[in-house]
Amino acid sequence: MTLLHGLPLLSWLIGLPLAGALVVWRMPQGHQARFIAVGVAVLELLLACLVVAGMDFASAGFQWIEHHGWIPSIHAEYRVGVDGLSVFFLPASALLFLIVLISGWNQANRSMPQLYFALLLLLEGVTIGIFCALDTLLFFLFWELTLIPIHFLIALWGIGPNRRHAAVKYTLIMLAGGAALLVGLLLATLAHPAPLTFDLVRLLHSPLARESQWAVFFLLLFGFGVKIPVFPLHLWLPIVAMEGPVAMAAIMTGLKLGAYGMIRLLLPLTPDVARELHWLLSGIAVVSMVYGALSAMAQTNLRRLLAFSSLSHVGLVVLGLATFTLEGVQGAVFQLLHFSLVSSGLFLVAGMIHQRLGSTDLIHLGGLVRPLPVLSGLFLFLGLAGMGLPLTSGFPGEFLLLISALHHHIGSGLAALGGVILGAGYFIGFYRQAFLGPLGPAVPATLPALLPREFGILMVLGGGILVLGWFPNLLLDATRAAAAGWLGR
């Protein structure tokens, strides 16, 4: 692996999907486009695994660092690198995009398939860039570039009648969050005591003066809170889940870029204010958890239920980060990686149900276990993993987060436990009505069984869930040094 360190693997990870998007977009036939897109995604996953294999997890610093001149007049550079907290998001993202591309295999038979696959690859490239960027201006560039493919994927391939309205609403809300994020990052740079720099490593090694951290904290909190999302900045999530394509819902709930932004930028850049306002972060987290769970219990549509469920689950991640403990940080990273398996899998199953019945409304469901026994069993398994069932990937991260919350403040810890119990209630209640019992009046006695590619997708996700559940130390040992270094800052 030593020989690999001379190679710009991170730049290849960012550039490969971007180049693949251009090639796919220019392909004359949709069938050719999908094969090339999936091939690019497979190669991307292999490169991401090579980066992980070449990491020294005993070191808390950044590795695989590359830097080149970009905008010399303002000292902005193309600077990328990863540490133990960010590196696992690379294969998780690559795997999720590969699965989404395979799940949209039949898109080649519809309108503009080349553009569909090209936009997904473009989104993959800039998403990988977010996880690698060590220059705050470069981070913001990748952050904003995600809006272009997401807008068109929702507007052109959404499954709801108001998909264009959903795309515009999402874009405008994210632009507002992006404006706050840009101002916050510029203030962090201008208030830095050293010469003008956007280098994240240098910014972290000489923290801002306490009085400068206040404005930066609230601006970044709004910018990342919109993307996470947390209550009350979540208004875009239910409508996108209902109107947009299932692939987008799977990506947005599987990859919590806003939560990663809190880990990488918000809390390290404003450590004094963040610790002083831990009660605010904890309050936002608890309200998001309880509100999301109660809202999910009131839903009669599976996709809206999963959207509010995602809001509730990510609240626990924010609560863990607000404790500023090793268990909280490691649990947050573990849970975010768990989302890439479970949350995305649940939305993909919802999409499979929609393809067969044309709806995910409870009134059109009932007794699905009879015509779709395998799909029903796999959905139950994913739901139990999302509830934190022992020996699944949902248990280690959730347990660490609850321990850190109870250690931090008994009230917030008990509220988190209440959110977990409510989560079990809304999932089991919906599953009983939609999958068990007699066939619903709108459910035919026979439905198409899972296709081999659909079964394979769910098996891969299930395998990852079991591996992380049985061997959590594979991840915890690898993130311990980086998490300790993060706390030290």
Image: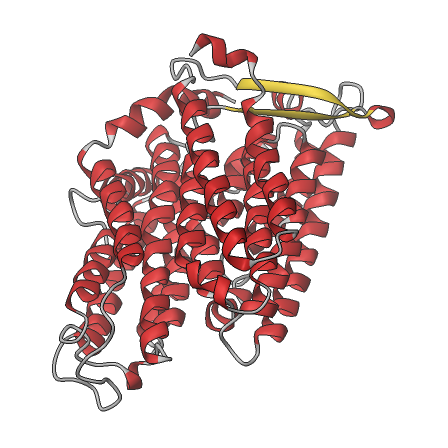
Residue closer to the observer: 23 or 303: 23
Image coords of residue 231 (percent x, y): 49, 61
Residue at the spot 59% in from the left edge and 49% down from the top edge: 24
Horizontal placement of 103 versus 82: left or right?
Answer: left
Q: Quadrant of residue 209?
A: top right
The vertical placement of 449 against 26, above or below, is below
Q: What colour-coding does the image apply?
A: secondary structure
The vertical placement of 91 against 218, above or below, is above
Residue closer to the observer: 97 or 263: 97
Image coords of residue 37 (percent x, y): 51, 47
Horizontal placement of 333 versus 448: left or right?
Answer: right
Horizontal placement of 231 versus 216: left or right?
Answer: left
Residue at the spot 39% in from the left edge and 57% down from the top edge: 103
- How many numbered badges does the structure rendering display? 0
Extreme-bottom residue of the structure? 441
Q: Quadrant of residue 266?
A: top right
Residue at the spot 49% in from the left edge and 53% down from the top edge: 34
Extreme-right residue of the structure? 73
Looking at the rendered image, the quarter that the N terminus falls into is: top left
Q: Quadrant of residue 214?
A: top right
Horizontal placement of 319 versus 183: left or right?
Answer: left
Residue at the spot 43% in from the left edge and 46% down from the top edge: 98
Q: Is residue 47 visible?
A: yes
The vertical placement of 363 against 137, above or below, is below
Q: Is residue 276 visible?
A: no
Image coords of residue 331 (percent x, y): 33, 37
Image coords of residue 108 (percent x, y): 50, 62
